[in-house]
Amino acid sequence: MHAAIRYQCILVRGKGLIVTIDGPAGSGKSSVAKRLASEIGFSFLDTGAMYRCVTLACLRKEMDLGQIQEVANIASQVQIEFFADKVVLDGEDVSEAIRTPTVTKSIWAIADNAAVRESMVAAQRRWTAGRDAVTEGRDQGTIAFPDAECKIFLTATPEERARRRVSQLLELGVEVNYEEVLEMQNQRDRQDTQRESGGLKQATDSIMVWTDGMTEDEVLQSLVAIVGSKRPTEVNPMAEQPLQHKPHLMPR
Ligand code: DC
């Protein structure tokens, strides 16, 4: 679609602008997506944290995570709130509790539950309604926001992602074998891409960014440039008034 017409649609729609960032585990999307949101003045939605919250809620109730309907009921009942520095589940700050290995190990059962995914996607759409937002996950550009104005698929070669993981763990004082990390990551990539519901897939209209050899600052700058390039720059000849730029879409 012609850029001016495309942006007129956005303005007429009267909603916020959505930037989706999807990509495989270890692509560094979580921290760079959060930094991007802050850099361009958008809200940030960490969708992985939502699946983590549902997992934690079910584990706390000692539920069998294979009970599809019961788990789906929890997903539709929990209240998840995002603040700048914390994630709140039913009124409790669970920012740390959702990142324990026990939660991480159990998420797959929740993330594979199609009814849970439906609730999560509906909640993501409600949360972003009327906001300018950066959303980060695996299905954001494909399923949650197929009409998003700016879609980015952030990735890096498996070897680079595994090297980064090894250095992150080393920084935390944990020594691991590179080959084992790579193998586990390949396994996770296979599971993520083959998942029937909400599997990792690049949206055909997304911009792919390979981050091999780039620092996080460099990745951030390239994402800021991509979002900046999507801002309206032309006057729609069919509109009575020139299109107004959304001020906070401009990179600072
Ligand atoms: O990004 P993360 O590691 O916090 O994500 C936690 C889990 O949730 C991970 O196993 C993938 C899954 N997930 C998902 O299925 N769909 C999303 N939109 C985001 C995360």
Image: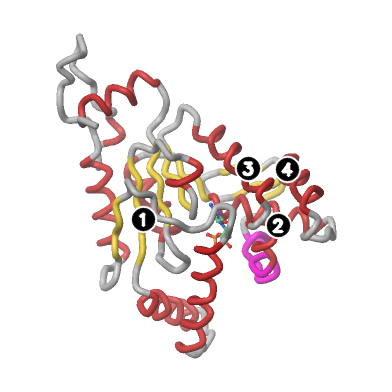
Which contiguous range is marked in magenta?
96-105
The spot of residue 232 in percent (x, y) is 22, 30
Disc number placed over residue 118 in the picture, else none: 3
In whole angstroms, how far apart are the C-alphas of marks 4 and 1? 29 Å
Q: Residue at x 68, y 57 (%)?
A: 110
Q: Main secondary structure of the magenta part?
A: helix
Q: Which of pointers 4 and 3 indicates the residue nearer the eye?
A: 3
The answer as to whether callout 2 falls within 8 Å of ligand 1 is no
Disc number placed over residue 78 in the picture, else none: 4
Disc number placed over residue 55 in the picture, else none: 2
The spot of residue 20 in percent (x, y) is 41, 46
Helix or strand or loop: what does disc 2 sit on? Answer: helix
Q: How is the image coloured?
A: secondary structure
Whether tag 2 and tag 3 are in contact, CB under 8 A, the answer is no
Q: Which one is in front, 204 or 213?
A: 204
Whether tag 2 and tag 4 are in contact, CB under 8 A, the answer is no
Amino acid type, residue under disc 3 in the picture: Glu
Whether tag 4 and tag 3 are in contact, CB under 8 A, the answer is no
Dot placed on the residue nearer the N-terminal end, 4 or 3: 4
Q: Is residue 252 visible?
A: no
